[in-house]
Amino acid sequence: MDRNHQFFDKVEKKTNVKKEDIFKLAQTVSNENLRDERTLRRLISQVASLAGVHVSKQKEDQIVSAVINNNVPLDFSTLSKMFDNK
């Protein structure tokens, strides 16, 4: 089993989001301007809906700020901690 397949299996198991849905979302986002606040907020809403989780206004603001200011960590450990903090 290749690493990508294992990764998406873990994501699907943890989030209950099918990898097909992740790929569809990725295709949609690939042509978007992720420096645009309105686009980011729409994307956050879509991901939250897909995952069945509520994202508070405060958390949404933090995510938008991090992306716009290019402060998004690239390692999964740090990203996980960022999203786990309530």
Image (tube, rainbow, N blue to C red):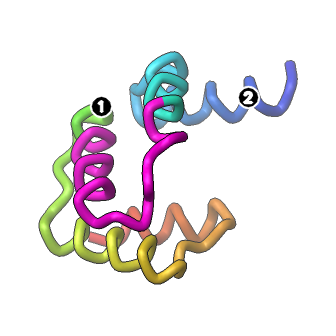
Q: Nearer the viewer, residue 15 or 31?
A: 31
Magenta part of the chain: 28-48
The kind of residue on which mark 2 rests is: Gln
58 lies above or below 80: below
Under circle 2, the secondary element is helix
Q: Gap in Å between the C-alphas at discs 2 and 1?
A: 20 Å
Give the prevailing secondary structure in the magenta stretch: helix
Is 9 displayed left or right of 83 in the figure? right
Please give the residue where the numbered disc 1 appears in the rendered image. 50
The kind of residue on which mark 1 rests is: Leu
Please give the residue where the numbered disc 2 appears in the rendered image. 6
Judge the density around disc 2: few (<14), some (14-19), many (≥20) Cα neighbours within 10 Å.
few
Under circle 1, the secondary element is helix
Q: Position of residue 36 (x, y in %)?
A: 34, 64
Residue at (60% x, 73% y) in the render: 73
Residue 38 within the segment the image draws in magenta? yes
Pair 2/1: label in front? 1
Judge the density around disc 1: few (<14), some (14-19), many (≥20) Cα neighbours within 10 Å.
some
Q: Earlier in the sequence, mark 2 or mark 1?
A: 2
Is 75 displayed left or right of 85 in the figure? right
Q: Quadrant of residue 58?
A: bottom left
Count of residue discs: 2
Residue at (55% x, 35% y) in the render: 11
Residue at (23% x, 59% y) in the render: 38
| Disc 2 and disc 1 in contact, CB within 8 angstroms | no
Is 86 displayed left or right of 81 in the figure? left
